[in-house]
Image: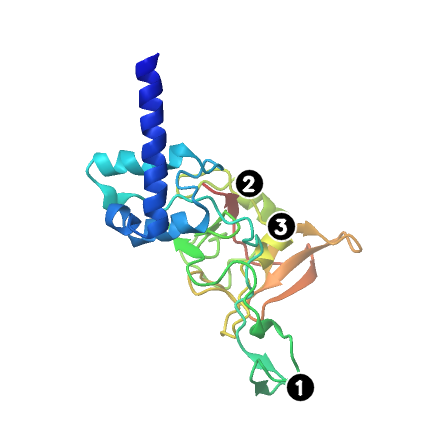
Amino acid sequence: MGRLFTVAVGFTSLGLLLGFCLWRGSYTALAGQAAENCAAQNGDVNADGQINLTDAVTILGHLFLGSPTELLPLCAPSPTTSGLPDTGQVLCYDDAGKEITCNSASCPGQDGASATGCPSEGRFTDNGDGTVTDNCTGLMWQKDSADVNADGQLTDQDHVRWCQALAYCENLSFAGHDDWRLPNVRELESIVDYRGRIMAIDPVFGALSMPYWSSTSSAALPDDAWAVFFVVGSVNGYGKEGDHHVRAVRNAP
């Protein structure tokens, strides 16, 4: 019993000492600047939702295993981080459409003046297998439009009616996954990028010229479904008998 108590006290003291070292900034020598920055945010190095001795043990384990510089910043996400993506817009305009400085007193408070939600930079990860992971929403997307006519090419001819779009995604087996689906309208709109490119979508994606179907029907006109037009970033309702493009989504990982 006495030995166990001594060991427990020793670990506690060591943890307190290590915590003091972290506070003093000497953590860089143990595990690198990236992990120091992580620990400085909230101290939850092992991402278990608590700040306690186990965080010190995590660091010590990496240290005495001989690879302290490989300790990853495992801090839990900051509770202040928004789950909404930023629009990507950084420019501001007056009521005539002329570009103005975003701190102009004549037309203040525009989107381009504020950094909101998940930042655009570093948001998307190209997985190298035809899929893209959105680190903001946690969704995995088809990188390119779906080749719905199965001709091996992605062209403006790859378009189908709404029910066909739903069925295509439900039956899709792609990049090692078979749980693909047609995104709802809010999911599809989340990858619109309003920075003013030719296509209003992050360049990690490919996009074609026609709207893309969502799985969401119009409540007012149920023979319509919502679709996103990435050429300009608009969301509109279209008759389900019309033909539009498809991009499948799934819940990552």
User: Which residue has dot 2 on it?
Assistant: 170
Residue visible at 58% across and 43% down in the picture: 167
Query: How far across and how far down the image is residue 242, in percent?
Result: 65, 58
Q: Residue furthest top?
A: 1
Query: Which residue type carries mark 2?
Result: Glu
Mark 1 vs 2, N-terminal side: 1
Nearer to us in this view, 157 or 215: 215
Residue visible at 70% across and 60% down in the picture: 237
Q: Look at the numbered disc 3 and give the secondary structure of its residue.
A: loop
Cα separation, mark 1 vs mark 3, equals 38 Å
User: Which residue has dot 3 on it?
Assistant: 184
Q: Nearer the viewer, mark 3 or mark 2?
A: 3
Cα separation, mark 1 vs mark 2, equals 50 Å
Quadrant assignment, res 225? bottom right
Viewed as shown, does residue 187 lie left or right of 13? Answer: right
Nearer to us in this view, 89 or 77: 77
Residue visible at 43% across and 65% down in the picture: 203
Relative height, residue 231 to residue 185 (above, below)? below
Q: Look at the numbered disc 1 and give the secondary structure of its residue.
A: loop
Mark 3 vs 2, N-terminal side: 2
Viewed as shown, does residue 146 lie left or right of 187? Answer: left
Viewed as shown, does residue 244 lie left or right of 45? Answer: right
Whether tag 1 and tag 2 are in contact, CB under 8 A, the answer is: no
Viewed as shown, does residue 93 lie left or right of 18? Answer: right
Image quadrant where one finds the C terminus: top left
Query: Which residue type carries mark 1?
Result: Ser
Query: How far across and how far down the image is residue 128, in percent?
Result: 34, 51
User: Which residue has dot 1 on it?
Assistant: 106
Mark 1 vs 3, N-terminal side: 1
Query: Which residue type carries mark 3?
Result: Asn
